[in-house]
Image (tube, helix red, strand yellow):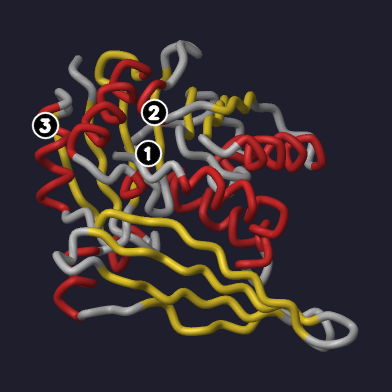
């Protein structure tokens, strides 16, 4: 099944999601530069659907570069935040609350993107297949899917248990961000505890938010893409792509 708690997780995080970064918008702009290079020849004003857009970390910088951007996400509060961030920057774009497994008919797109380890929220082959089929239906013939996930192949080999603390900000505007992972006995899923500790005038406030991911291996995603009808499946890794996670691209049938 899908981890529907992910909607609650991101609803709760939406208001402070930017605090995960030292400077969210600067990081988003750099991300937009990398993604624009990875979109395999597409240039503005090509149409892009970010089907797991969150608060707009990828969609908004692509809109700023002149792409015609639409964003969808299961989290309604994240969609509200994406709209607000777009308005604050004078950026065009449409944002809709939607389940990636059933993306509404919003038009036909040159590319669909899903970044930052979103697809592993789909915990079963059935739900992953439904999502990829839904994505394919939103692509024009020959259109491009670009997705990024954590490198679970390497994570499983190394026995990773989380993400070490990082400190952002200075003075009384500091926050500490960390992740603690609890693995299922079969190592097929992990419960992620996202820890955010923010400094206040009188001390520190701590928020722990929890969600579940599937440890989605590359071969499993390849199989799911092929089953959904995608072709020309290719992987790129951070040393070559410049993106911090492995990137997979694939083509809808022409």
| 8 relative to 161, above or below | above
Q: Position of residue 205 (x, y in %)?
A: 74, 77
Q: Quadrant of the N terminus?
A: top left
Mark 1 closeness class: few <14, some 14–19, many ≥20 residues within 10 Å: some
The disc at residue 242 is: none
Q: Which residue is rendered at x = 57% and y = 28% of the image? A: 97
Q: Name the residue beneath numbered marker 3.
A: 226
**Pointer 1: what residue?**
39
Quadrant placement of the C terminus: top left
Q: Looking at the image, which residue is at 44% across and 41% down?
A: 4
Across and down, in percent, residue 199 comes to: 78, 82
Residue 132, position as x, y percentages in the image: 27, 29
Question: Disc 2, disc 1: CB below 8 Å?
Answer: yes
Q: Could you say whether the residue bearing mark 3 is in a helix, strand or loop?
A: helix
Residue drawn 62% across the image and 45% down it: 55
Counting residues from the N terminus, which is met first, the one under dot 2 or under dot 1? 1
């Amino acid at each position: 099944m899908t981890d529907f708690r992910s909607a609650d997780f991101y609803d709760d995080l939406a208001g402070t999601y930017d605090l995960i970064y030292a400077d969210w918008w600067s990081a988003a702009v750099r991300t937009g530069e990398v993604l624009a290079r990875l979109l395999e020849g597409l240039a503005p004003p090509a149409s892009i659907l970010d089907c797991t857009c969150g608060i707009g970390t990828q969609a908004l910088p692509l809109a700023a570069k002149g792409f015609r951007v639409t964003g969808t996400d299961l989290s309604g509060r994240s969609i509200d935040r994406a709209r607000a961030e777009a308005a604050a920057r004078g950026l065009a774009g449409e944002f809709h609350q939607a389940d990636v497994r059933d993306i509404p008919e919003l038009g036909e797109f040159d590319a669909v993107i899903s970044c930052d380890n979103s697809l592993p929220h789909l915990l079963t082959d059935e739900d992953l297949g439904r999502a990829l089929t839904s994505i394919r239906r939103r692509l024009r013939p020959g259109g491009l899917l670009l997705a990024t996930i954590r490198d679970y192949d390497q994570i499983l080999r190394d026995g990773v248990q989380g993400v070490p603390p990082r400190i952002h900000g200075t003075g009384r505007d500091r926050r500490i961000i960390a992740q603690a992972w609890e693995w299922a006995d079969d190592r097929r899923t992990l419960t992620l505890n996202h820890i955010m500790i923010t400094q206040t005038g009188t001390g520190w406030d701590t928020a722990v938010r929890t969600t579940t991911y599937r440890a989605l291996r590359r071969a499993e995603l390849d199989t799911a893409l092929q089953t959904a009808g995608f072709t020309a499946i290719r992987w790129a890794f951070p040393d070559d792509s410049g993106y911090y996670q492995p990137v997979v691209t694939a083509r809808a049938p022409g």
